[in-house]
Image (cartoon, grey):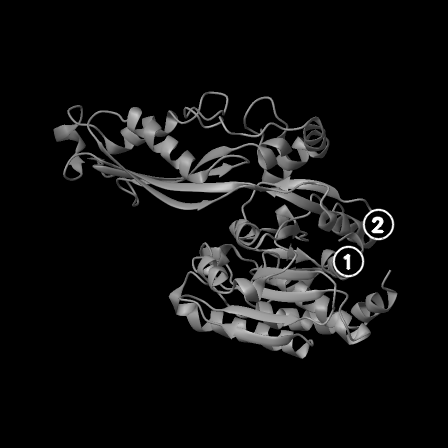
Amino acid sequence: MNEQIYAYLEKNRALYLQQMTDFLAIPSISSDSTHKGDVRRTAEWLAGDLKSGGVEHVRIMETEGHPVVYGDYLKAAGKPTVLVYGHYDVQPVDPIGEWKTDPFRPVIKDNIIYARDCSDDKGQVFMLAKMAESILDVKKELPVNIKFCFEGEEEIGSAHLNHFVDAHLDLLKADVLLVSDTTMVRPDQPAVCYGLRGLCGLEVRLKGANGDLHSGVYGGAVQNALHAMVALLASLHDQKGKVSVDGFYEKVRPLSKEERATCAKLSDDRALMKQLDVDALYGEEGYSTVARIWTRPTLELNGLFGGFQGEGLKTVIPSAATAKITCRLVPDQNPEAIGRLLKKHLEKHLPAGVKLDVALMDHAEPFIMPLDHPALKAADAALKNAFRIKPVFSRQGGSVPIVNTFHDKLGLAPVLMGFGLDSENFHAPNEHFHLVNFDRGLRALVDFLYLLPRQM
């Protein structure tokens, strides 16, 4: 379809990989204030790269937190406008002792690059920038209009992006949103993602006596906060993995026969058990593994702590306990409503002798898109051409909250076309990215820009 551009990408591959290595080497950890300068340096690097690639009106735009990098190229009269979103901030690297290579000294081995955020999401942000650069270098013009919006706070909840969007609605106005922050189904199976789960997070705190107590002096007379917490948390699920909170499933949209069949076909329990080194999988009865991950709501305990944590024993009755919980939600569940249901359940099942405090935290709306949208058809054709296999229309278990923001505030149709793999250790030690998908993904992104005007 675009053979000249493909040849250009192949010719410049070594240069691009060196540039990506330089980009990944900057430790843009948004959650760590000591790296604030590195986050800005990453924004400056990205802005410079967009400029050198031919993008116009490139600027670093301030927020109350880390900046947004913006740029555009608006010379395709009468053609659709694509808003390209990604994030250039990264997760912390702890535990650093489990890394086999330095997370900020990228290494390429066996056509795989190892570095923090090479898969999620700086590596894919780099691809989005090179998508435009390669077309402009070869063709001297783009087949669509493009606006870039790269943020530096996604890994800390995009704290200031909603306000940024509200303040720049005209600047960000477009027809389609392009995001490369999702994953392929398998190493050789690309996916067009049309649905994401939402999120509801909360912290649960229990307080018993006015301090930790000697277990010999007071044991058997007062409530142990950890005992109470364990009992309270156990009430959240039944013995078969179903959430026991009244009303939790009330708004859940049922699956179509086609969705059930697709999920069943893609479920490979043995391969997943081998990947995770577990002897069994666990989840809600009546659904395949992929259906549980993509299309069913969950309630997970993310952390539980209280009492003595040091080496050896300390015979105390803990006076306080804390748990962190997140729920992944599906259409048409509302995060705030689910939070209220959880709080009501916890109050109802609270053991005697402790006080309860519930703090609602991060939340994100679930999202789903009609499969017959023209932008998805263009993505389908682009991926098929680049990977030589028909892509799967998938939903995914994670959350990308900004997708809802752009959809609700700007009316944008999201195209979620990512090239990472679930097995690439993003957010964990030894994150990596298969460069075969870097190559094929770049071709798919280029083709998408050419195919989009034919569909819309």
Q: Which residue is the extreme one toward the left?
A: 217
Find residue 190 and report its horizontal and vertical position in percent: 73, 47
Secondary element at image label 1: helix
Counting other residues with Cα less than 10 Å from the Cα at mark 2, is it few (<14), some (14-19), or many (20 or more)? few
Find residue 214 and report its horizontal and vertical position in percent: 15, 34
For residue 299, side relative to residue 54 (left or right): left
- Earlier residue among tags 1 and 2: 2
Find residue 375 and report its horizontal and vertical position in percent: 72, 51
Q: Residue at (70%, 66%) from the top-left corner?
A: 145
Q: Residue at (48%, 42%) from the top-left corner?
A: 199
Residue hosting label 2: 388
365 or 279: nearer the eye? 365
Q: Which mark is residue 85?
A: none
Indicate the amino acid at tag 1. Pro
Residue hosting label 1: 453
For residue 72, side relative to residue 320 (left or right): right
Indicate the amino acid at tag 2. Arg
Q: Distance between the residues labelled 1 and 2?
A: 22 Å
For residue 347, side relative to residue 149 (left or right): left
Q: Residue at (51%, 29%) from the top-left corner?
A: 251
